[in-house]
Image: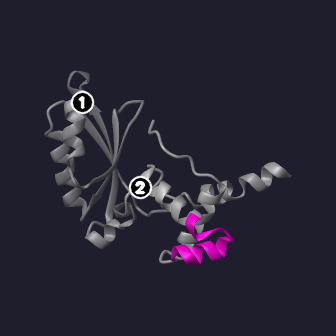
Amino acid sequence: MLSMHLIDTLDARILLALDHDTQATVLALSRELGVARNTVHARLRRLLTGGSLGPFSQRVRTEALGLPLIAFISVAISQSSSQEAMEHVRRIPEIIEMHATTGDADLHAKVAARDPADLHRITNQILSIEGVVRTSTAMSLVEVMPTRTGPLLESAAHRDHADQT
């Protein structure tokens, strides 16, 4: 588990305001939220440096990079070479998210590809890694709901108010 600053009510309100207007200045945010400009500035700096926010590159849509196909590949790895194999899998640029999991597979990778043939190439690249035993692939047909944290921020933004009632 990562050690990071936990987002409080004001942090959540600042982030929601930035969701609404991504180019809002610190001054505009301070006016909208009714807090001092220095407070907003300090909070944003702490969020950026404290590990609470991911990199801006995570906002880039894979379609904009010419990779519209999303798939999920479960990867089974030989336990004797798991760390090395995992590191090799991690180096494949089309793997945009990866989790160690329980169950039949050791890794669950989210992959962006140009088309089914490109996905086949990526899958073969994974299978060629020493220590990878097998893979299982599921292609996404339609993104029903993208990764979201807005509702969690809404809840956090109102947490203190709900605690007081």
Three-letter code for the amino acid on which mark 2 is drawn: Gly
Q: Compared to 80, does 140 lie above or below? A: below
Quadrant assignment, res 15? bottom right
* Residue at point 41%, 30% (across, down): 103
Three-letter code for the amino acid on which mark 1 is drawn: Gln
Q: Is residue 163 magenta?
A: no
Relative placement, left or right, of 21 versus 136 is right
Where is residue 7 drawn, in percent x and y?
58, 51
Where is residue 89 drawn, in percent x and y?
22, 42
Residue range of the region highlighted in magenta in the rendering: 25-38
Relative placement, left or right, of 139 versus 47 is left
Where is residue 109 drawn, in percent x and y?
33, 46
Judge whether residue 145 can be spotted in this image.
no
Image quadrant occupied by the N terminus: top left
Reading the image, the residue beneath label 1 is 83
Q: Compared to 124, does 155 lie above or below? A: below
What secondary structure prevails in the magenta region? helix
Q: Of discs 2 and 1, which sits in the foreground?
A: 2
Along the viewing direction, whichever of 76 and 52 lies nearer the viewer? 52
* Residue at point 32%, 66% (across, down): 62
* Residue at point 64%, 76% (across, down): 31
* Whether label 2 touches label 1, CB < 8 Å: no
Judge whether residue 126 can be spotted in this image.
yes
Residue 54: image tag: 2
Q: Secondary structure at mark 2?
A: loop
Cα–Cα span, label 2 and label 1: 24 Å
Quadrant assignment, res 99? top left
Q: Compared to 6, does 66 lie above or below? A: below
